[in-house]
Image (cartoon, rainbow, N blue to C red):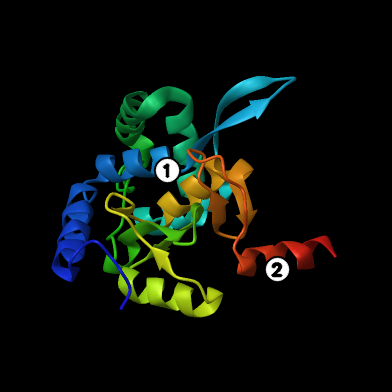
């Protein structure tokens, strides 16, 4: 059986608590704004926060609204901050021509399947190699990974975090420079860069 350092009821309780925490509209917008933003680095134009467009469909599902509406409003939050954007939305909603319209920062119902766990699965023989993924069934997912790569992996305490697919996108984007292949990354806190057989084979195929 896969080694997951938490009991099933602990995992379920953490999901329920997180879902309740981000149910209010402002909390959900704040979460999506944080998870959909990364720092872009450019030698010519400098650095600054930008939206990860790949995350927009995920945030739209979490918010329960259209993806284009999510992108527009998250862009406004990025530009003016959550409180500034929220004040703008409230003023906009008071305009006579918007009578009967949904609030600017409206959110729809949040489905249970949106929330699960972000996991960091380490290859036991190569602990500097980590798979970053999202699942609602962490233990089953760990066993599936082991079956596919034919290597033992583990999740350490603190390396399973309740969240959504937006968290996976955030980590993948911010660890992009450490990517080996797909969802496999080097741990930046370790200097070793050897590869387990299943990833070495993937690198050879990609180089061919």
Q: Is residue 85 above or below residue 30?
A: above
Q: Point out residue 9 in the picture as x, y percentages from the top left corner.
A: 14, 68
Which residue is found at the position 50% from the left and 41% from the top? 190
Q: Nearer the viewer, residue 104 or 17?
A: 17
The disc label shown at residue 35, or none: 1
Q: Which numbered mark, 2 or 1, is in the foreground of this view?
A: 2
- Neighbour tally class for label 1: few under 14, some 14-19, many 20 plus, Cα within 10 Å: many
Q: Which quadrant of the view contains residue 143?
A: bottom left
Q: Where, quadrant-wise, is the C terminus in this rendering? A: bottom right
Q: Point out residue 82 in the picture as x, y percentages from the top left corner.
A: 35, 29
- Neighbour tally class for label 2: few under 14, some 14-19, many 20 plus, Cα within 10 Å: few
Q: Point out residue 140 in the picture as x, y percentages from the top left corner.
A: 35, 76
Identity of the residue furthest to the right in this view: 208
Q: Secondary structure at mark 1?
A: helix
- On screen, residue 11 versus residue 49, left or right, reads left
Q: Which quadrant of the view contains residue 2?
A: bottom left
Which residue is found at the position 70% from the left and 20% from the top? 45
Q: Is residue 123 above or below residue 63?
A: below
Tell me the residue that label 2 is attached to. 201
Mark 2 and mark 1: span between their CA atoms? 33 Å
Q: Secondary structure at mark 2?
A: helix
The disc label shown at residue 115, or none: none
């Amino acid at each position: 059986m896969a080694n997951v350092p938490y009991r099933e009821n602990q995992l379920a309780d953490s999901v329920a608590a997180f879902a309740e925490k981000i149910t209010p509209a402002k909390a959900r917008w704040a979460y999506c704004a944080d998870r959909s933003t990364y720092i872009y680095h450019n030698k010519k134009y400098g650095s600054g926060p930008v939206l990860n467009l790949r995350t927009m469909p995920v945030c739209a599902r979490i918010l329960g609204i259209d993806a284009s509406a999510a992108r527009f409003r998250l862009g406004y939050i990025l530009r003016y901050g959550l409180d500034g954007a929220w004040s703008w939305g409230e003023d906009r909603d008071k305009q006579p021509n918007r009578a009967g319209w949904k609030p600017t920062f409206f959110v729809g119902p949040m489905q249970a399947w949106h929330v699960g766990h972000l996991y960091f699965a380490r290859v036991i023989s190569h602990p500097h190699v980590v798979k970053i993924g999202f699942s609602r069934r962490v233990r089953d997912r760990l066993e599936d990974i082991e079956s596919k790569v034919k290597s033992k992996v583990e999740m350490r305490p603190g390396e399973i975090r309740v969240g959504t697919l937006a968290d996976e996108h955030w980590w993948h984007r911010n660890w992009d420079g450490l990517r080996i292949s797909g969802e496999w990354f080097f741990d930046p806190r370790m200097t070793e860069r050897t590869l387990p057989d299943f990833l070495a084979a993937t690198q050879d195929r990609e180089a061919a």
